[in-house]
Amino acid sequence: MDVLKEVGNIGAGNAATALSKLLDKPVDMQVPKVNLLPFEAITNIVGGSEQVVIAIFLRVVGDAPGNMFFVIQPASAKKLLERIAGLEIEEEEDRFSEMEYSALHEIGNILAGSYLSSLADFTKLSLQPTVPSLAVDMAGAILSFGLMEYGAMGDRALLIDTKFLEGQDAVEGHFFLIPDPESFGKMFAALGVPVE
């Protein structure tokens, strides 16, 4: 599990650098937890299948295809936009403006791209992201749709919890990588992670 956490930490470092440049302010990121877990457990991690979440989804193509999600709850997204991105957010509103969605999309894109780049460097596999999409819906609906679109999927997911830090403020999000069945062994063997 150490190598997986190292991949997460390097990805977080790269993402923090990219976000700092984008926002022109210091942004730090930490990876407090990395886990391999059954796919069914994902919805529980993000608050249950009926929990409304914001998700950035992208497909990984190349030597080890799979699906990648960055999932954050709306309240955390508001904190992220307000405290990290410096946008003025109406706390009472449940909706997000087009500009706020655009900012979340870009942050998710940077985050996912940074992790994928770190994973590709560690594994020496060719891994490229597709253009990401953003969705706001119940967690169960988003995860099911994103995975059903590509047919067969793996039964385990790599969870990387992420913590954005700006000063004393911290905002948490969840990053999931779900390799396709034929990709799982290839990816984790390249990382030196034993898979039962």
Image (cartoon, rainbow, N blue to C red):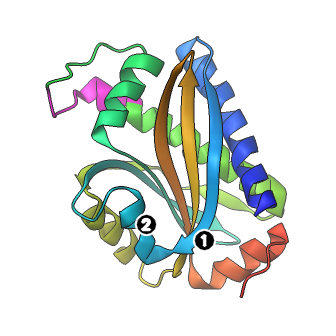
| Image quadrant where residue 28 sits | top right
Specify few, some or many for label 1: CA neighbours under 10 Å numbering under 14, 14-19, or 20 or more.
many
Q: Nearer the viewer, mark 2 or mark 1?
A: 2
Dot 1: element: loop
Q: Is residue 146 visible?
A: yes
Which image quadrant: the C terminus?
bottom right
* Residue drawn at (64%, 57%) of the image: 34
Stretch of the chain drawn in magenta: 93-103
Q: Position of residue 167 (x, y in %)?
A: 57, 15
Three-letter amino acid code at disc 2? Ile
In-image side of 181 versus 89 (left or right): right
Query: Which residue appears at 75% of the width and 78% of the height?
Result: 186
Q: Earlier in the sequence, mark 2 or mark 1?
A: 2
User: Are dots 2 and 1 in contact, CB under 8 Å?
Assistant: no
**Viewer-proximal residue among 42 and 63:** 42
| Viewer can see residue 85 | no
Residue 65: give its label: 1
Q: Residue at x 27, y 65 (%)?
A: 49
Q: Dot 2 surroundings within 10 Å: few (below 14), some, or many (20 or more)?
A: many
Looking at the image, residue 29 lies above or below residue 73: above
Q: Is residue 133 above or below residue 90?
A: below
Q: Quadrant of the N terminus?
A: bottom right
Identify the residue at image location x=30%, y=24%.
Answer: 99
Relative to 59, residue 25 above or below: above
Task: Examine the rendered structure and indicate whether residue 148 appears above or below residue 118.
Answer: below
For residue 145, which quarter of the picture? bottom left
Is residue 95 shown in magenta?
yes
Q: Position of residue 134 (x, y in %)?
A: 35, 47
Tally of marks: 2
Identify the mark at residue 42; answer none if there is no mark: 2
